[in-house]
Amino acid sequence: GKLSISSTTVCASTMASTESATNDKNTNTNNAQKEAEATKKALNSFKSDIIERTTVIIKEYLPIKIVQLTSLFNEIDAKQTDIEKLKFGEGSDTVSPDVGASADAVAATELNGVESHGAKNPTTNKNKKKRSFNEMAFDDKDNKSTSNESSNKNARKGKNKASTSTTTTAATECKETQLKCNAHCERNEEIERFIVMVKKEVEELIDYLDQIQLFINLHTPKIEDGNNFGVEIQENMKSMVSTGQLSAQDFLRNIPKWHTLRAKLISKVMKYPNLADYQKSIIELDYKQMLNLKHCLRDLRNNYLVLYDVLIKNWDRIVKPKGDKNITFQIY
């Protein structure tokens, strides 16, 4: 009787342990299924959110950007910029009178310094004769008198050096003041404002292109045989979007080049203020940068227009590349 009771208790305990283990497994599987369903819902909601937001961008924001950029380009192109006035207007004379006067003053002081040192007149030694011992003895007597004269000459040279040093310092100070007043060494605030505006538009275009590329990728079907014409259209659209992204990124990379080239030319102007070609080169560089910015703004408008036109024309093929799957084709 005691053995039967103990065996039944052991069986009951083992059954309880197995039931608890199965219950734990069921709860773990249920929790895993709930987490998988929650992540799937989150992914679906994220996908639907991206699709809805990009649809609004394509159908509403792109036409607005086309109209805004067109009006902005027409407004900027109608006006004459400051650099165009400087190039074609009254500011064509690049060397200002103050800078020219300072250059003349520096050149004059340098010439005076050269003249103060005294020009050495070369003597011809062709007719020079040999001297006798008596003449050399007389020369020893004359050396005492010439030494006094040489000391007087050295004192005069010291005075001339002091005067030339004062003139050179005055010339350098005059050069620095004239360079500070030089308009070519200042910042071109008009181009910098234009760069900030175009840079903002380019960054916005890159953002839109990223969202459109993701929109097309989310509508790409699984790989199957046959009926891949819509997939080819999607690939063409993705290649067009990627080329637009690369061109926008190239524009952003080329912005610092203008600053470096302008800084080099300004350093040349500060080093050689009397050369008008360096000052003209700064004007030509600024004018070229202004033309590039206008061209970039026009290209932005054209890219928006072409992108909107192609997307709207091929909207059904982009959204449903395989067509409607419910349609059944019958061959008779």
Image (cartoon, grey):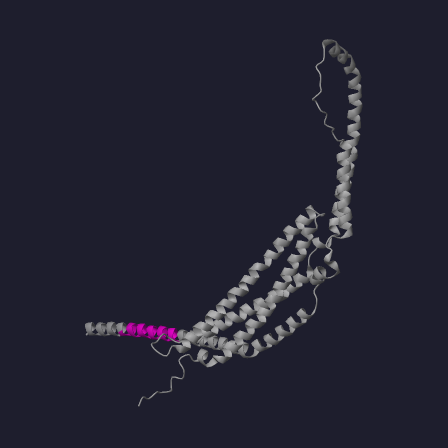
Q: Quadrant of the C terminus?
A: bottom left
Residue beneath the point at 51% across and 79% down: 312
From the viewer's side, name the closer residue of 32 and 135: 135
Residue beneath the point at 63% across and 60% down: 288
The residue most toward the front is 127
Residue 52 appearing in the image: no
Looking at the image, residue 277 lies above or below residue 128: below
Looking at the image, residue 32 lies above or below residue 169: below
The residue most toward the top is 134
Magenta segment range? 15-33
* Rendered image quadrant of residue 131: top right
Residue 16 is inside the magenta segment = yes
Q: Residue 59 location, x and y as percent?
A: 54, 79
Residue beneath the point at 61% across and 57% down: 258
Q: Quadrant of the N terminus?
A: bottom left
Residue beneath the point at 62% across and 55% down: 259
Q: Residue 216 location, x and y as percent?
A: 46, 74
Q: Residue 224 location, x and y as percent?
A: 34, 76
**How many badges with numbers are in the image?**
0
The residue most toward the bottom is 332
Looking at the image, residue 127 lies above or below residue 313: above
Q: Is residue 287 left or right of residue 55?
A: right
Residue 21 appearing in the image: yes
Residue 271 is inside the magenta segment = no
Q: Residue 283 location, x and y as percent?
A: 68, 57
Q: Is residue 34 left or right of residue 181?
A: left
From the viewer's side, name the closer residue of 118 and 234: 118
Q: Determine the main secondary structure of the stretch shown in magenta.
A: helix
